[in-house]
Image (cartoon, coloured by chain):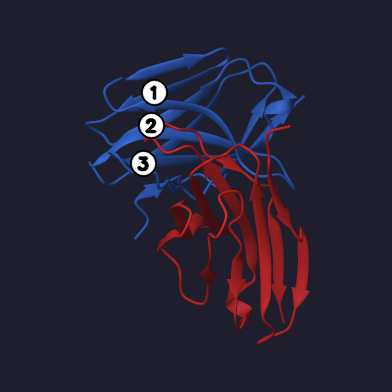
Chain colours: A red, B blue
Amino acid sequence: EAQVTQNPRYLITVTGKKLTVTCSQNMNHEYMSWYRQDPGLGLRQIYYSMNVEVTDKGDVPEGYKVSRKEKRNFPLILESPSPNQTSLYFCASSFLGAKETQYFGPGTRLLVL
Amino acid sequence: DQQVKQNSPSLSVQEGRISILNCDYTNSMFDYFLWYKKYPAEGPTFLISISSIKDKNEDGRFTVFLNKSAKHLSLHIVPSQPGDSAVYFCAARFQGAQKLVFGQGTRLTINP
């Protein structure tokens, strides 16, 4: 089944404790992206990747890191999480092309205490 | 600065009637628009899209209208069904770009 998977789905952590949210897709997509969803703000892009070893900042990259060592995986790293990073996170992927549909993972709900 | 705006956080419609969800944008460089639907505990799923060279696109019960001069698009669902209850996100894309710019979302509730 074609899908984007994220782990963990739910996470409670404390300020400053490094964490990684994994994202994997099995559709051989070149493009992958991370979004965060916050009430009243919709989904905002954090980072994106056009292909292996090619990543760039989105609209709200502060406090986040990413890597793209393999085509299928695009982990989101929070080196020192803070309470303002409490949010719902979505990974998405698509083929390259302006009209290609982006497929979203199920989301990871993060609470930083 | 919110470039894509959905000014109605919620909408309640009776089953069988028409649901109309609205979206406004500010950047005239957007050339492709999409609607995504999101159920609780799931990721958004693509619903329907429209290119800026068109003013209407239809797919079954779903129709998207684009008014470029007003920088406004709308999603019509006819007839509305209980399974349409979800959050709907409007999104826009710049020409040649992959990035999606999303609105805040509208929660649609279809009442039996």
Q: Amino acid at mark 1?
A: Phe
SS at mark 1 in the image = strand
x then y, percent, for residue B42 = 71, 44
Q: Quadrant of residue B44?
A: top right
Q: Secondary structure at mark 3?
A: strand
Crowd around label 2: few <14 · some 14–19 · many ≥20 (10 Å): many
| Image quadrant containing the N terminus of chain A | top right
Above or below A108: residue A86: below
Sequence-wise first label, 1 or 3: 1
Task: Look at the numbered discs 1 and 2 and tell me whether their residues touch, using CB distance below 8 Å.
Answer: yes
Q: In which quarter of the view is residue A60 placed?
A: bottom left
Q: Could you tell whether B15 is left or right of A30 in the image? A: right
Let me know if marks 3 and 2 both belong to one chain.
Answer: yes
Q: Residue at x 67, y 37 (%)?
A: B86
On the image, numbered disc 3 is attached to which residue?
Answer: B93
- Pick the front one: A2 or A51: A51
Q: Which mark is residue B73?
A: 2
Subunit under mark 3? B
Residue A18 found in image quarter = bottom right
